[in-house]
Amino acid sequence: MNFQLTQEQEMLVDSVRSFVEKELLPYETEVDRADEVSPQLAAQIRGKAIAAGFYAFNMPEEVGGGGLDYLSQALIERELSKVSWALHVFVARPSKILMACTGEQINDYLLPCIQGEKIDCFALTEPGAGSDANAIKTRAVREGDDFVLNGSKHFISHAGHADFAIVFAVTDTYEHNGRKRNAVTSFLVDRNTPGMTIRRGPKCVSNRGYHTFEMFFDDCRVPANKVLGEVGKGWDVANAWLTAGRVMVAANCVGQAQRALDVSLQWAADRKQFGQAIGNFQGVSFKLADMATQIRAAELLTLHTAWKMDQGTMTDGEAGMAKLFASEVLGRAADEAVQIFGGMGLMDESPVERIWRNARIERVWEGTSEIQRHIISRELLRPLLR
Ligand SMILES: Cc1cc2nc3c(=O)[nH]c(=O)nc-3n(C[C@H](O)[C@H](O)[C@H](O)COP(=O)(O)OP(=O)(O)OC[C@H]3O[C@@H](n4cnc5c(N)ncnc54)[C@H](O)[C@@H]3O)c2cc1C
C-alpha cells in the first residue's frame, strides 16, 4: 500500500493551511463572540476563496468546480475545519445533489453556485423527522404546472444566507414489504417564493455565527420545472451524496482533533506547576499520547475510506465507520484538551473552549453516532440474517 500523498496533494494541503491561517483564523474570536459573520467578511472570504481556486472544490471540473478526487477533498476538509464552520462555510461546497440539475436549472442554480453567485441550503429535517428522514410530513401536491408545498422544516443550516433551498417533500406513498413508505421528491425553491417563510432557529452551542433556520411552507407554489431529479426519486439523488458527506465530516473531525492536540501540546510545554512544565507529569503526557494515537487512527481510517470512494469500492457501512470513529475521537480529544488546560480550558479566551463546544455537533448531524452504528451493524449482519 502506498501511503504517500502526491506532490499536488502536499501543495494543496500547504496552500489551504496558509489560507486558513491568513484569511479565517484571525476572525474566529470576534465571530464566535458576536455569533455573527458580517456580510462584508462573508463576501471577503468568498472572494478570496474564489481567487485562491478553493471555491466549489468538491464539484466536477466539467461544470467549473475543482474536479478533485475524494482523497484530496478530505485533505482540504481536514485543514478547513481547523476553524469554525461559521467561517469556512464561505469557502462553499455546493450540495453535490445539484449535479442532478437539468435544462434551465443548470444555468439558474448549478453554475451560479459554483461561480459564487448563489448559495444553496439543504432542507430535509423536520421537527417530527430527524434520524427517521423517511417520516417527513411536508407534502407537495401537483396542481396544473405547479406543485403546492405545505409543511415545515427545522435545523436548516445557513438558510439565512441561501438564495434557494433544496427542499424534500412527500409526493406519493407506496407499499414496501407490507409497510407504507413515502415517495419523496426534491425541489429547488427560491428564497422569495410566496408561501415560504424562513426564520432563525434556536441558538446553538456549536459553531457560533453559523445559524440554523426554520422554514414554513403554506400553499407554496413551485413550478414543476423546479423538480430536482425525477418525481418520487428524491432519495436516489440525496443518498449517494449524504453518504459521501459523512466521510467529509470525518475529515472535519480529524482536523479539529488535530488542532485540539496541537494547542494542548503547546500548553503542556508552557504551563508550569510545581516548578515544571505540566507536560512532565505522566497524568498529562499520557493524555497527549492517547490523543495523538487516536487521531492518527481516525485520520488513517478517514483517508483510506476517501481513497476507497475514489476506487468506487466504499460501502455505506465504511462511510459510517469513518464518521462514527472520527467524531468520537474528536469528542474525547476536545474533552482531554479542556482537562489539560485546566480552568483556562473553559474560558472563551482559549481556543479549547470553542473546540470543545464545536466538537459536540459532530456526533449529531449528518447521522448520529447511533444511526452510524445502525448502518454498520446492518451491513455486517445482512448476509447472515434471513
Ligand atoms: C446545528 C445543526 C445543523 C443542521 N443542519 C441541517 C441541515 O442543513 N439540513 C437538514 O436537513 N438537517 C440539518 N440538521 C439536522 C440533523 O441532521 C439532525 O439533527 C440529525 O439527523 C438528528 O436528528 P434529530 O435531531 O431529530 O434527533 P432524533 O432523530 O430525534 O434522535 C434523538 C436521539 O435518538 C437516537 N435515535 C433515533 N433513532 C434511533 C434508532 N433507530 N436507533 C438508535 N438510536 C436512535 C439518536 O441517535 C439520538 O441520540 C442539523 C442539525 C443541527 C443540530
Image (cartoon, rainbow, N blue to C red):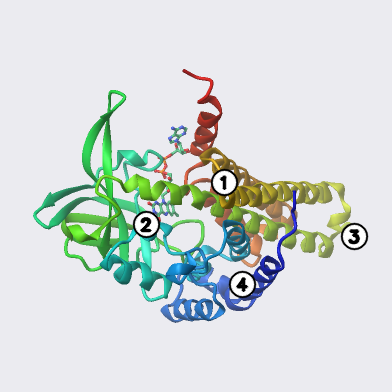
Calculate the distance from the C-alpha at mark 3 to the C-alpha at mark 1: 38 Å
- Of 274 and 27, nearer the camera is 27
Disc 2, SS: strand
For residue 131, above or below residue 251: above
Circle 3 is placed at which residue position? 276
Spot occupied by residue 233 in the image (x, y as percentages of width and height) = 30, 46
Label 1: which residue?
Answer: 323
Q: Which of labels 3 and 1 is toward the front?
A: 1
Q: Is mark 2 within 8 Å of ligand 1?
A: yes
Pointer 2 residue = 122
Dots 2, 4 in contact, CB < 8 A = no
Q: Amino acid at mark 2?
A: Phe
Badge 3 or badge 1: first in the primary sequence:
3
Marks 2 and 4 sit apart, C-alpha to C-alpha, by: 25 Å
Compare marks 1 and 2 and give the one earlier in the sequence: 2
Q: Residue at x 71, y 64 (%)?
A: 6
| Residue type, numbered disc 4 | Val
- Viewer-closest of 123 and 200: 123
What numbered label is drawn on residue 47?
Answer: none
Q: Nearer the viewer, mark 4 or mark 3?
A: 4
Q: Amino acid at mark 1?
A: Lys
Mark toward the start of the polypeptide (2 vs 4): 4
Q: Which image quarter: residue 342? A: bottom right
Whichever of callouts 3 and 2 sits on the residue coming sooner in the sequence is 2
Residue 222 appears left or right of 202: left
Which x, y percent locates residue 255? 64, 59
Residue 253 image position (x, y, % from top left): 60, 54
Circles 1 and 2: CB distance less than 8 Å?
Answer: no
